[in-house]
Amino acid sequence: MTKRAGQRSRITLTGIAEAAGVSVATVSKVVNGRSDVAPATRAHIEELLVEHGYVARGAGGSQAPVRTIDLTFDALINPNNLVITQGVTEAAAEAGVDVVINVAPDDPLGAAWARKVAHAEREGVILVTSELTPGQRAQFDQAGIPLVLIDPMNVPDDHVPSIGATNFSGGMSATEHLLRLGHRRIAMIEGRHDATCNTARLHGYQAALAGAGISPDPRLIKPGNFQFKPAYEAALELFALQDPPTAVFAANDAEAFGVIEAARMHGLRVPQDVSVVGFDDTVAAGTSAPPLTTVRQPLAEIGRAALRTLLRLAAGQSLDSHRVELATQLVVRDSTAPPPGHA
């Protein structure tokens, strides 16, 4: 369609920001009537908004903007992501914010990614279980786009807020539960070695053993990568040992299901011959055979906390803490019991 004579091209927040020499986030604050913008900057932005006849997307002629955030995952196959999404979207609905779900692009330097988010005029990004590179952090910071991380793979710097669970105490409580039942040869199937949550769960496992006067046996610690098949293969190796474990703590529920299948292949019964504990309390945990003892993460509340934190950042408000850990809880079901022959 040919543009009519005198018709002006529609201006965006990005265009206003470029004209004013400020970030998109600063323009968004002015549009939303927030007070944390210098008076001179605010006046200049308001003049540009009037000059260019800015109308927010979907506003139908009104100046009420459509507020949107990005919820970005490393992949969409993790069963935890559905529960996290539920928490984020519930909190967003209460705040009148739309949520767009994305998969993190392969952009280590972050320039193209940050430009895309800025052009879409997002208020910020929640990044789930991904690694944030220094380049990506610098690009988002330069663009004035707030970031909040959920269970980041790497440890972010002190200026990037992150939300997670008490992984150390969760790993400790899982192992202590097995110790109370009388188990002494307790194996662990790890998750990804580069994941901070895995390291915390491993340290919790080791601390519980140390508290019981047991030195961890390196032969009983196997990699599982948070996945069924690697955990299954690792458990087959464990059960083939001359002195196999009587219990296994898996770094997540998917791994725990792999351990249970490996036990079946070895002719072992769960929990009569070997006990298994998972981590996460996914939907399948309560309906597996047997129902899985596991450590529950408050995934929906983690999602809600991340959304609330992001909106505070977008509003220019300060945070009480840049690292928040919500409490885990051991859920005892039918996959754990005293070891064979235990009185």
Image: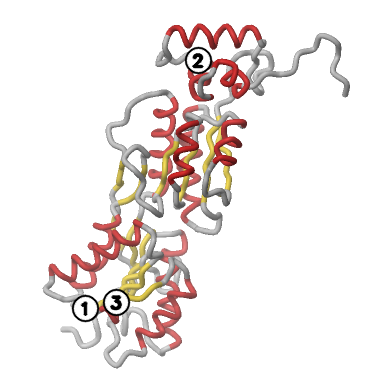
Tell me the residue that label 2 is attached to: 30
Q: CA distance from mark 3 to mark 1?
A: 10 Å
Helix, strand or loop at mark 3: strand
* Residue farthest bottom in this picture: 242
Determine crowd level at label 1: few under 14, some 14-19, many 20+ residues with C-alpha closer than 10 A. many
- Identify the amino acid type marked 1: His
* Quadrant the C terminus occupies: bottom left
Which residue is depicted at the point 21% across and 88% down? 341
Q: CA distance from mark 2 to mark 1?
A: 61 Å
- In the rendering, at what x and y percent does residue 205 appear? 24, 67
Q: Earlier in the sequence, mark 3 or mark 2?
A: 2
Q: How is the image coloured?
A: secondary structure
Q: Nearer the viewer, residue 109 or 302?
A: 109
Q: Nearer the viewer, mark 3 or mark 1?
A: 3
Mark identifier at residue 27: none
Helix, strand or loop at mark 2: helix
- In the rendering, at what x and y percent does residue 277 appear? 33, 69
- In the rendering, at what x and y percent does residue 273 appear? 31, 85
Q: Earlier in the sequence, mark 2 or mark 1?
A: 2
Tell me the residue that label 1 is attached to: 183
Q: CA distance from mark 3 to mark 2?
A: 56 Å
Tell me the residue that label 3 is attached to: 187
Q: Is residue 100 left or right of residue 10?
A: left
- Identify the amino acid type marked 2: Val
* Quadrant the N terminus occupies: top right
* Residue farthest right in this picture: 2
